């Protein structure tokens, strides 16, 4: 399976059509994935060619051109003046500051969390080595971008820094790597624990 976002998400970012938390996750992935960065650059070039073609068309198309130009200009890019951080991509650093001083709060032993103020379902989790989060399923999609360390999903394999996992309405279980894991999550809805342990912990469903 691919560890990159679907191309339509890249297209939405390239054209500025998507300013949601999903675009935020994609922008973070781009910093960690040369292949997707290349794709977005190519999509932007094709957008420019489209604009050039529109200039020869009927006058009313100039409204379309203006609209398109606005969207291209509005495409999210990583802030250039944000310093490099070994864990956080620049969009996250711009939000939280350096990873070394990030405001983690412990939710259960072995798991810390930071809520990002970009909709209630966008957050970071930091897992201690070997942690197994309770089995759970989702309402809507769960989108995960690994920022540090990694984990193994029992059904979908290994995920490491830069990898994106998109999971729909299915039960899934994971175990964190020996060096732990920090990941960015963008979820459509609450997560539903499927074991009594998960229900007791209920750390997933607090937003
Ligand atoms: Zn990629």
Image (cartoon, grey):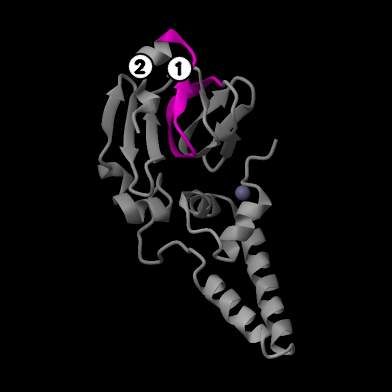
Q: Secondary structure at mark 2?
A: helix
Q: Is residue 132 left or right of residue 159?
A: left
Q: On residue 174, which mark appears? A: none
Q: Nearer the viewer, residue 34 or 207?
A: 207
Q: Are marks 1 and 2 in contact (CB under 8 Å)?
A: yes
Quick one: which residue is furthest to the front in this view?
Answer: 60
Residue at image point 57% right, 20% down: 171
Is residue 16 shown above or below 7? Answer: below
Q: Residue at x 63, y 59 (%)?
A: 11
| Magenta-drawn segment | 172-196
Q: Which residue is disc 1 drawn over?
A: 134
Residue 131, percent across and down? 42, 19
Task: Pinpoint residue 17: horizontal percent, then vertical percent.
Answer: 56, 63
Residue at point 62% right, 45% down?
Answer: 4
Question: Which quadrant of the figure has residue 45?
Answer: bottom right
Q: Is 177 in the magenta?
A: yes
Which callout, 1 or 2, points at the residue further toward the start of the chain? 1
Q: Nearer the viewer, residue 12 or 3?
A: 12
Q: Residues within 10 Å of mark 2 (few under 14, many from 20)?
A: some
Q: Quadrant of the N terminus?
A: top right
Left/right of residue 85 with respect to residue 11 in the rendered view: left
Kindly report the secondary structure that dominates the magenta region of the rendered protein.
Answer: strand
Q: Is residue 132 above or below residue 47?
A: above
Residue at image position (47%, 22%) is 192
Q: Which residue in the protein does label 2 denote?
A: 201
Task: Give the SS element for disc 1.
Answer: loop
Q: CA distance from mark 1 to mark 2?
A: 8 Å
């Amino acid at each position: 399976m691919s560890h990159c976002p679907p191309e339509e998400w890249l297209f939405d970012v390239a054209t500025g059509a998507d300013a949601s938390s999903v675009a935020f996750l994609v922008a973070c992935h781009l910093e960690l994935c040369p292949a997707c960065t290349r794709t977005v650059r190519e999509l932007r070039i094709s957008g420019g060619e489209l604009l050039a073609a529109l200039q020869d068309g009927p006058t009313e198309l100039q409204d379309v051109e203006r609209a398109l130009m606005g969207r291209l200009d509005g495409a999210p890019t990583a802030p250039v003046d944000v310093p490099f951080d070994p864990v956080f991509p620049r969009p996250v650093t711009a939000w939280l500051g350096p990873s070394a001083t990030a405001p983690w709060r412990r939710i259960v032993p072995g798991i810390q969390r930071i809520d990002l103020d970009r909709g209630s379902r966008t957050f970071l989790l930091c897992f201690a080595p070997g942690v197994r989060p309770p089995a759970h399923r989702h309402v809507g999609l769960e989108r995960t971008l690994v920022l540090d360390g990694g984990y193994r999903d029992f059904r979908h394999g290994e995920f490491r820094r830069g990898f994106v996992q998109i999971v729909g309405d299915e039960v899934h279980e994971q175990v964190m790597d020996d060096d732990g894991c920090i990941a960015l999550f963008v979820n459509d809805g609450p997560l539903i624990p499927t074991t009594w342990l998960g229900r007791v912990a209920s750390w997933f469903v607090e937003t």
